[in-house]
Image: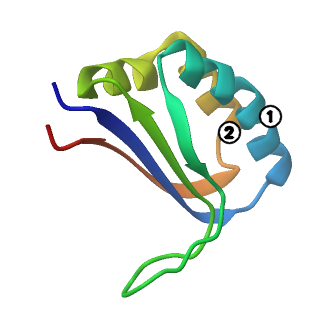
Amino acid sequence: MAKGYWVSVYRTISDPEKLAAYNKLAGPAVQAGGGRRLAVGGRVVAHDAGIAERTVLIEFDTFEQAVAARESAAYQEALAVLSDGVERDFRIIEGVD
């Protein structure tokens, strides 16, 4: 079964305090959903139309697990705290089996 991944690229961070509050809730929510952080805000080299901002990559054992973690009550709470504090491109993708 193919793994699932969250890929999140931040275009702008307009409220660092909201992002910090989100991080406090999102980390435990992701862990509870079976997610493992592979990359969080490290160095980025952007090409073409890429954005060299904060990028996050999280791995789940399955695509379905990744979708369920995003829909969980705990993660929804984290999103409510984040609100309009950032503009980001968030995707859930299926890995190669």
Q: How many marks?
A: 2
Report which quarter residue 28 is drawn in: top right
Q: Is residue 59 left or right of residue 41?
A: left
Q: Residue at x 19, y 31 (%)?
A: 2
Q: Earlier in the sequence, mark 1 or mark 2?
A: 1
Q: Which residue is mark 2?
A: 82
Q: Residue at x 75, y 45 (%)?
A: 19
Give the Cα distance between marks 1 and 2: 7 Å
Query: Above or below — where is 16 with respect to 50?
Result: above
Q: Position of residue 9 (x, y in %)?
A: 51, 59
Q: Residue at x 59, y 14 (%)?
A: 74
Q: Which residue is mark 1?
A: 21
Question: Local crowd at mark 1 within 10 Å, few (<14), some, or many (≥20)?
Answer: some
Q: Are marks 1 and 2 in contact (CB under 8 Å)?
A: yes
Mark 2: amino acid? Leu
Residue that lies at the very extreme toward the bottom in this rendered image: 48
Report which quarter residue 43 is drawn in: bottom right
Secondary structure beneath disc 1?
Answer: helix
Residue 39 badge: none
Q: Position of residue 26 (x, y in %)?
A: 64, 28
Q: Residue at x 52, y 56 (%)?
A: 88
